[in-house]
Amino acid sequence: MLSNANSTNRIFELDFFKIVCCILVIVIHSYGEFLPHSMMGILDALTAVAVPGFMMVSGYLLFFTPEKKYDKIIKGPILRFCSIFIIWFLVYIYEAYMLNHSVDVGSLMLNNSEGWHLWYIKIYIQILICYPIIKCITNNEKVTNLFSVLWMIFIGLKYSLNFFPNIPQEYFKILQLPFFEYDGYIGGTTAGYHPAECLGIFVLGGMAIKLYFQKKKEVGLKMDLIALIVVLASIYMIVLFQREFENLDLPVDMVRSPFHIYNVIFTLAFGFCCFRVSGRLLCLHELFEKVSNNCLGVYIIHPLVQRMIVSIIVKNEIDTNRIGVCAIIFVLTVIVSFIIVQILHKIVPQKILKYVL
């Protein structure tokens, strides 16, 4: 979420990948709200890269580009994203109260059933706070590699225990430390993604993107084909696993968790493909930059826009549990959200807007 440099030093591969991930997030919330995973199939599998994709881009910009002074991070990104989080957290709480005056506002604020998508901003703030410590890891290649391996082993063990419900998992509460988490809630982490889990994606993904840019000129058709095969195989595997999990009465969301090793590999391969495609779309780089600059705003406001669109559809007695209707919800949510954010960029001074969107 740090700025992708200025126009002269812009990394357009990152712009394109951010746009794709932003669209996939809206896909999750447009289809996933109304349709079961089994009906979404390949589309559902593709959305598994959205969250870790954002983390990888943020990790690269934060830890694998020239070092930032910590005081500037406190005065800049930390202050900015704290402001954004507080403002929109309250906006979504207020929206819930206006829709239903009988709701317990205190309970909403603790459990955060509204504004749930803001969990990513909260996680990002916590990663920023720990910047000096994490930077010590990423400054040393051997330490970074060791950290990545240990993280993958630890996360692999954690998710393997889902298959053994009788084994207590309380000691994994360490994933919530030293941050203000409680069972993955308070302020937006209803998805259950904890800072220590996310940190591995930031570091591992950022390192992978750095390696790509270092070796970019050496990449040829062979690597393109390998990445494409990995993407197709990953999609097939996720769809297959979801069906098996449904048959075994296990939570399907486990399959799409961004912290499964195969999903990390899937995201790396998918990101590689996006980077390669964007490199061949030179005529669209200016468009990528403009759209990418609006991605954060679209991410923040799209649930409000989506609920407005859904309410109109429901009032007209149209069944939302149909793929075609969900497609309309998705397209309208994307278009309306981008238009609103673009208008705000035009009419609100940037010095103010950066603390809001």
Image (spheres, grey):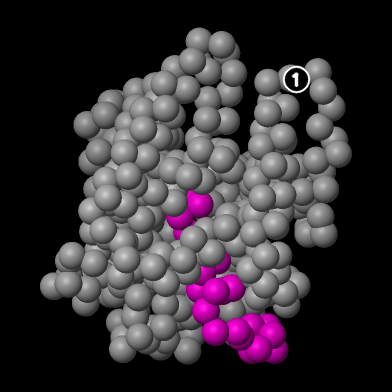
Find the residue positioned furthest to the top: 247
Q: Nearer the viewer, residue 264 or 107?
A: 264
What is the count of numbered marks?
Answer: 1
Q: Secondary structure at mark 1?
A: loop
Place residue 321 in its image quadrant.
top left
Relative to 223, 357 lies left or right: right
Mark 1: few, some, or many residues within 10 Å (few <14, many ≥20)? few
- Residue 18 shows up from this direction: yes
Q: Nearer the viewer, residue 166 or 351?
A: 166
* Residue in the image at 40% along x and 35% along y: 234
- Residue 61 included in the magenta stretch of the image: yes
Find the residue positioned furthest to the left: 283
Q: Name above or below for residue 227 compared with residue 318.
A: below
Query: Where is residue 175 drawn, in percent x and y?
Result: 77, 48
Place residue 157 in its image quadrant.
top right
Query: Where is residue 249 drawn, in percent x and y?
Result: 57, 13
Place residue 319 in its image quadrant.
top left
Say what amino acid the circle numbered 1 marks: Pro
Residue stretch rendered in magenta on the structure: 50-75
Task: Give the dominant element type of the magenta stretch: helix, strand or loop.
Answer: helix
- Residue 66 included in the magenta stretch of the image: yes
Query: Where is residue 240 drawn, in percent x and y?
Result: 41, 21
* Residue in the image at 52% along x and 79% along y: 65
Q: Nearer the viewer, residue 184 or 104?
A: 184
Relative to 177, 89 lies left or right: left
Relative to 319, 51 lies left or right: right
Q: Name above or below for residue 337 compared with residue 248.
A: below
Residue with the mark numbered 1: 165
* Residue in the image at 41% along x and 65% along y: 212
Q: Name above or below for residue 263 compared with residue 188.
A: above
Query: Where is residue 334 drawn, in percent x and y?
Result: 29, 54
- Residue 300 shows up from this direction: no
